Image (tube, rainbow, N blue to C red):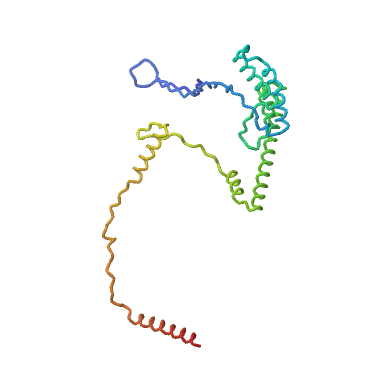
Amino acid sequence: MNIARTRSFPGADIGSDHDLLMMTFRLRLKEISKPKHTRLKFDLEKLKDPNVLETFQAMIGGRFAPLTIMSYEDTDIDSMITTFNTAVTETASEILGKHRQKKKTWITAKILDLCDKRRELRKKRFEPEGSEKYKEVNNNIKRCMKKAKENWIGEQCSEIEENLRKNNSKRAYQLVKDLTTVKQGKATTVQDRSGKCLTEERQILNRWTEYCSELYNHKANGDPSVLNCTQTDTEDDHPILRREVEAAVQSLKKGKSAGVDN
């Protein structure tokens, strides 16, 4: 607890021989270390390369060869499973390597290697020699990240132009949408009437149904007499205008008929 400010009020009107104390403090909670994941993930994308796939098959086949000549009657099944898992794990670690999760698409393997190096130098960043190396690697990572992002954006723009040139507007607009859309997290909890958080899917659907039913239950109390049709007046208020229109129509008909006869 880091005490920032403390003030006492000795003249407080209370029935006690103690003084009133006001304190502003800041509490720092200790960070709880989470257990690390023990599951190994290998870079399976390398198997798409025919040369890497051939090397992996040859090496793992050589390590499985002793297992094929062993007698199943004299061998413990647990030891065979352990030997099998060890052979696969060691071969994959040597040929494929661990899978590295990329939070950004433009991050390359070189940047990840530099990040590993910076992680090792982080412990020595307070030393004179280690501080210089840490700053150098950190600046190098920033430059590589900036350059890799610019190259990736250039590749995306080139692909958009290529799709537009080929009249593949669907793919082009999809690329534009992926570049400009900001991803937002999806809310998985809602609150009920009392403020309690609901996490079950069925409870969330029921709560939304209840909320929408209350929101759109407005009952209109209008005047139904406005729907009644008024009676139209059959008398002609403009007889002169009506006669002029009829005369013009008749003249037009006569003109058309005379043109047909000619």
Choose top left, top right, bottom left or bottom right for residue 213: top left
Residue 15 locus on image (x, y percent): 33, 18
Tell me the quarter of the picture where residue 113 sits: top right
Residue at point 66%, 33% (across, down): 45
Q: How many marks?
A: 0
**Residue 248 drawn above or below residue 6:** below
**Is residue 150 left or right of 236 when viewed as pictured?**
right
For this orientation, the residue located farthest to the top is 74
Residue 56 percent across, percent down from the top left? 70, 27
Q: Residue at x 47, y 87 (%)?
A: 258
Question: Which residue is found at the position 28% from the left and 55% from the top?
Answer: 222
Residues 29 and 241: in front is 241
- Front residue (pair 91, 34): 91
Q: Position of residue 241 (x, y in %)?
A: 36, 80
Instruction: Write the residue at 35% across / 33% down.
Output: 194
Q: Residue 90: image x %, image y %?
A: 67, 21
Q: On the rendered structure, is 98 left or right of 211?
A: right
Q: 214 and 56: which one is in front?
A: 56
Classify residue 171 as left or right of residue 193.
right
